[in-house]
Image (tube, grey):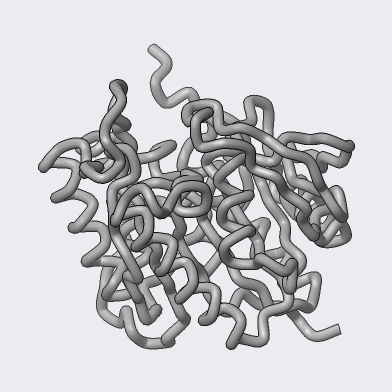
Amino acid sequence: MSKGKIIGGYLVPNQPHALLAPETSSAWQSLRDSYERVRLEIEQTDAELLVLFSTRWVSIIGHQIQADPNPKFWVVDEDFHDLGTLHYDLRMDAEFAQTYCETAEARGLHARTVNYPGFPIDVGSIAALRLLNPDNRFPACITSCNVYSDRTETLVLGKAARDAVERSGKKAIAIGVTALSNRMFTDWINPAEDHIHSQKDDEWNRKLLELLSEGRLEDVSQLSREFSRQANGDSKLKAVWWLAAAMGQNNDYRGTVFDYQPVWGTGAALVGLQPAPGAGAGLEYDEDDADVFHGDRNVVSP
């Protein structure tokens, strides 16, 4: 079997507003329209698999991977009950999920597959797959975001995703489901008046998007700690760490920012990254790297 590869990557929002209520806000409608552009772009590739990392699927111990071939049920967003019910009937690649679990364990991570009726798929993954893969044209795989994992552990999880894709022999699209800045309004707002929570958050979001538009994914990955300190990055931008590691930890991409809008104060963006060898020549990468997870390093211990 020939070696599989990741042929493209995307960042998409982690909230369901563009799916459930686009008509109530011009910003949410714009995101809905941009999802359509991304969907068409993905369908024009020869992809065989969608691999998702979602910050809305939170795990505590290790990393979970969805392995039910056809999860179907319904959920209600824990924050936005008024948006209504999210029904899902999805197509998962159970064999790939098992491979991913094995490659994660081979790199020292604690991982397990999940497969039981009625498992509550997170709203971010549901919205992404309903809008990008409405007819289940592509099988998918979803992995969780461990709330306690640091950058090293998350990078190793991304590398394990790349290992699994290579072993599968398939061409895959990697998708990080995440917000950028993640400060939500705590009081009700008129959806038509939605805006980024603060000017500071907006400026940091735009700085990251400028780098991504230049294809500088690894630079964004290494800037994520400072971004999170300044703009309350969603889960410390772990989805960006994971995506950068899965795609090869470089800046060799053609970046496209399809959209950037507020969703209840958070920064919501759709970004595409297509491999373009040589595009990042001469740029430096400053952070340390790891191929195997050896456990917590107790770097904050006395």
Q: Look at the picture and state if 125 lies above or below 187.
A: below
Question: In the image shown, does 118 or 183 lie closer to the viewer?
Answer: 118
Image side of residue 251 versus residue 226, left or right? right
Image position of 155 (left or right of 266): right
Which residue is painted at 68% across and 51% down in the image?
A: 142
- Pick the front one: 240 or 194: 194
Q: Nearer the viewer, residue 48 or 192?
A: 192
Q: Please say if 48 is above or below 206.
A: below
Q: Nearer the viewer, residue 147 or 277?
A: 147
Position of residue 92 relative to residue 184, above or below, is below
Residue at the spot 29% in from the left edge and 32% down from the top edge: 183
Q: Quadrant of the N terminus?
A: bottom right
| Residue at the image point whose x is 35% and y is 51% from the top | 268
Whether residue 289 appears in this view of the structure is no
Residue 81 on image: x %, y % = 53, 28
* Residue that lies at the very extreme toward the front in this rendered image: 23
Image spot of residue 140 (x, y percent): 72, 61
Whether residue 152 is visible here, answered yes or no, is yes
Q: Indicate the quadrant where residue 78 lies.
A: top right
Number of dots carrying numbers? 0
Residue 109, given in percent of the width and then of the height, sits at 69, 41
- Identify the image quadrant of residue 129: bottom right
Which residue is rendered at x = 37% and y = 81% of the image?
254
Where residue 296 sits in the image (x, y, percent)? 55, 29
Q: In which quadrant of the rendered image does the C terminus lie?
A: top left
Extreme residue toward the left, this view:
199
